[in-house]
Image (cartoon, rainbow, N blue to C red):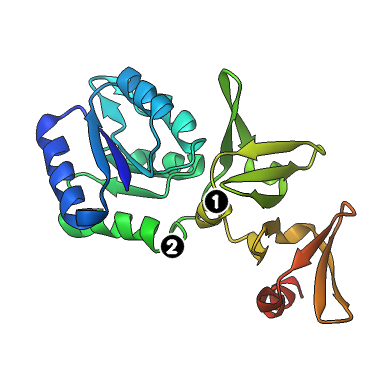
Amino acid sequence: MNILIIEDESRIAKRIERMTRDFFANTLLSLHHVEALSDALEFIKNNSLDIVLLDLNLNGENGFDILSSAVSESFHTIIISANSDQAISAFEYGVIDFVPKPFNRERIEQAFNRVLLKEKTESHKVKLLAIKKRSRIQLIPIEDVLFIKGAGMYTELFLTNGKKELHDKSLEKLEQLLPHTFERIHKSYIVKMSEVKEVIVKPGSKYIAELKNGEFLPIGRTKYKNLKARWL
């Protein structure tokens, strides 16, 4: 695990660091701490990360100024903040968990386990998917996504306007963040259930999802029963 802590209070940062080291033990490859947003953006740009732990109030700087950039990356973001009233907004951006201050070891470990055990977020309130577009970040409303295809370590978002966009998160990571309106139907595909027109059974126990836009997506054999039950 490569982890970055973005926290301006030294005492709290050291506490988070101690709990992180205790939890990950021998699986922790690197743990870095920065206090300012500019340093955080620079570090994220130049380093491979698995988890970012982000405070939302950094010496008067707003953590949301980095959030859209952070959630467009391949890693998961965990918010650790006293600003509990901003939890809903943070989940809408696509964070994996929001840990309110003051926190204890159990709550921090719960957030880490959510990442490791690939659990879905409790709120499922993600409304935006952030993607990198050259020198800027583009926020795509979740309602504009028809289906998602795995592309190695990345994913391809297929949108209602016919366009396709590349996301840095893997299919597994996006599956954790997406609302229940989306379903994993295949090892390489997640689809918005409202877009499924018909479930087709072909000879040889092959299953196909026909979408309303005319697309045909494969359905894994182990996924067929659950998908058919939901679709009906």
**Label 1 sits on what residue type?**
Leu
- Point out residue 58 in the picture as x, y percentages from the top left corner: 26, 25
Mark 1 nearby-residue class (10 Å; few <14, some 14–19, many ≥20): many
**Residue at 38% across / 23% down in the picture?**
41
Residue receiving disc 1: 174
Disc marking residue 87 = none
**Label 2 sits on what residue type?**
Glu
In the displayed structure, 176 sits above or below 154; it is: below
Q: Is label 2 in a helix, a strand or a loop? A: loop
Residue receiving disc 2: 119
Mark 2 nearby-residue class (10 Å; few <14, some 14–19, many ≥20): some
Give the image quarter of residue 184.
bottom right
Judge by depth and name the residue closer to the eye, 224 or 154.
154
**Residue at 17% across / 46% down in the picture?**
102
In primary-sequence order, the first of circles 2 and 1 is: 2
Q: Is residue 98 left or right of residue 130?
A: left
- Point out residue 64 in the picture as x, y percentages from the top left corner: 40, 29
**Residue at 70% across / 71% down in the picture?**
220
In the displayed structure, 47 sits above or below 191; it is: above
